[in-house]
Image (spheres, rainbow, N blue to C red):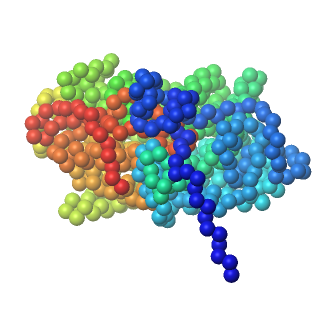
Amino acid sequence: MYKPAPRRPKKTSIVRSRSGCKACRQRRVKCDEKQPSCSACVRRGNKCEAITPNFEFRDGVMLGTKRCNKRKTTHSKELPIQGTITQDELSLSGSDDYLIEPNHRDNAPTPAPHPISDEWLSCSPSTPQSLTTNFPSPLPNQTIRSLGRSENELFYLTHWEKSCVQSLPSFQAQITVMAEEHAPLLQALLALSACNMSRSLPEGTEGGIGTSLSQIIYRPRRDYLLSSQHYYGTAIKQIAKTIGKGTSSSISHTLAAMVLFCYLESAMGNFANFACHTQGADTFINTHLTKISSDPIGREIIAAWVLAKYHAWWLRMNFSSFSFQLHQGSLCLSPDISNMLRSINAERVIVTSILCESYRLNNIALLQLGPCRTQTSDVTVEECIASLRIESRKLDEWHAELPQSELPIESFSGIMDHDEGGIRPLMFKSHYFAMNYAYYVSSRIMQCTALLQELRCTRSESNDPGKKEVNYWMALLVRIVSGLNKQDCFKGNVYSIGVSSLLVACLLRCQNLTIGRWIEKWLHEWSILSILEEGSFPIFQALKAIWLINEEKAAGNDIYALALPDDDGGGTGKYMSYNSQHFDMMVTLGRRGTSGRLYSELVPINIES
């Protein structure tokens, strides 16, 4: 018997990277990729700009490459569903034709273990059981070669029905039927479905800058991402033609496609493009409000659009600068929109609007009461407190209208046992009802004004009833969270405010370290289960914030707010990673436990695996 040939030794030990800065790439020198500026740019005084994927959609001609199938087909412009895509093909993402290579074992999606690295989620080769394995597997390449355009679309439509619909508002159940008669909507639907698949089935490569060769870097799947961008570009072109024609028969369909664009950009963390689509949807709705509001489906689509706006605002608000947080305008709905939402009983949208507005008001008041009180806003602390009372009355009305079937199954007694750290879950009949109630409880936390009153009067009382009220609502939120199924959160919270970012915001209002440690442990379990993001929010980023809050509390300090030193506009978008922002320092705002003095300081972020 012959022994297998020995593996050919590598010609070089250099680890090459494609994520250096633009200046070093142009000068053809190695970039050390330090943040926020690499050493070469600091030395030369240049602005250090990261290289981001540039997806363009243009008509192109396939270069002289051997095609997989010489037979001429009608679907030659369809992007591949599965297969190897080289870096050259990635750079030519605007081309309408692609070569499908044979499938390789190394390219199969691998569940991602613990996310450790901030820049790229990397981890050791050991792979635990992942929740992401429940998603549909890619079709074999031999099957794909025989599929036509309609079958490729059916592949993504199947994923849409199985995984995407349950995470979107109720009107999305009718989207598939609507898309059959409206081409732009179908393309937008396929784009969102492919985007969801790219982020749910990560692919791993070994090594990279700042990691050992034994570590694996996980990124969204490129082939599904390219398919998503292809459908996205096609939908944009078709929408432009539809609006240009001014046909009134497709108003609801056109608006539905624009809302799907908003969801896609929100999931990708691309806030600039999201703002562009939101502005277009605003103009479109104002132009056709009468016709849209007279259509039951049109009212549902407006509800979905409002929910997408609040979701993106929440994502942008977290991990921004104090200046950005301080100057946020009112999020209250107009009377026409509010009445329309109540007519269709849009409970999720109404409670989300109250949550976001309460968070905004509470945060603005806190920042104005910070150290030296140098932060100013157009809204005074007194006006914020008065507005919070108004939001509290709205929340009372919302809760009073909840049917019995959407309330917790068991009683509120026995919230938690602090001695053993045990928590009795608060159960609901569905994940959707549980999340609605989590938003309700979080709104109550944001509407507690005892801390604002205390800081305004510059006094501290350890047994303040207001603190007990916050602890009560926070413990109730923890009971709800402990009863949630992580897989339901992973799939069902993609396009809404998820649990991870919700816990970060609420923990800043609660000074109970026991609750903070439980939340930290609960979030760490997500990384063990290979979940990289939830509610379109990076789990690792949330874990960083919770860890920092707990460290400050363990040192005897009360911490009220977190921010970045400089606002980065929400990051660069999550095209090839699961984090849109990369930072190692944060600004904390709090109060010293010993002296009661307010403080603000720059704190390094460092989490050991």
- Left or right for 237, reference 136: right
Q: Nearer the viewer, residue 389 or 75?
A: 75
* Residue depicted at x 32% and y 36%: 586
Quadrant of res 61 = top right
* Residue 375 screen position, x and y as percent: 27, 22
Q: Position of residue 504 (x, y in %)?
A: 34, 44
Q: Residue at x 68, y 81 (%)?
A: 1
Q: Where 346 sits versus 484, above or below?
A: above
Relative to 161, is 23 on the left or the right? left
Left or right of residue 408: residue 135? right
Q: Residue furthest right?
A: 71
How many marks the image carries: the answer is 0
Say if residue 564 shows up in the picture: yes
Q: Residue drawn at (90%, 51%), measured in percent from left and top? A: 71
The residue under the point 27% across, 38% down is 603
Pick the front one: 19 or 379: 19
Residue 592 position in % (x across, y down)? 15, 38
Q: Position of residue 372 (x, y in %)?
A: 19, 23
Q: Nearer the viewer, residue 338 or 108?
A: 108
- Residue 312 lies, with reference to residue 484, above or below; the image says above
Instruction: Specify whether 143 is left or right of 609.
Output: right
State the residue in front, 415 or 496. Answer: 496
Q: Is residue 189 visible?
A: no
Quarter residue 426 falls in = bottom left
Name of the residue lying farthest toward the bottom:
1
Q: Residue furthest top?
A: 378
Image quarter of the C terminus: bottom left
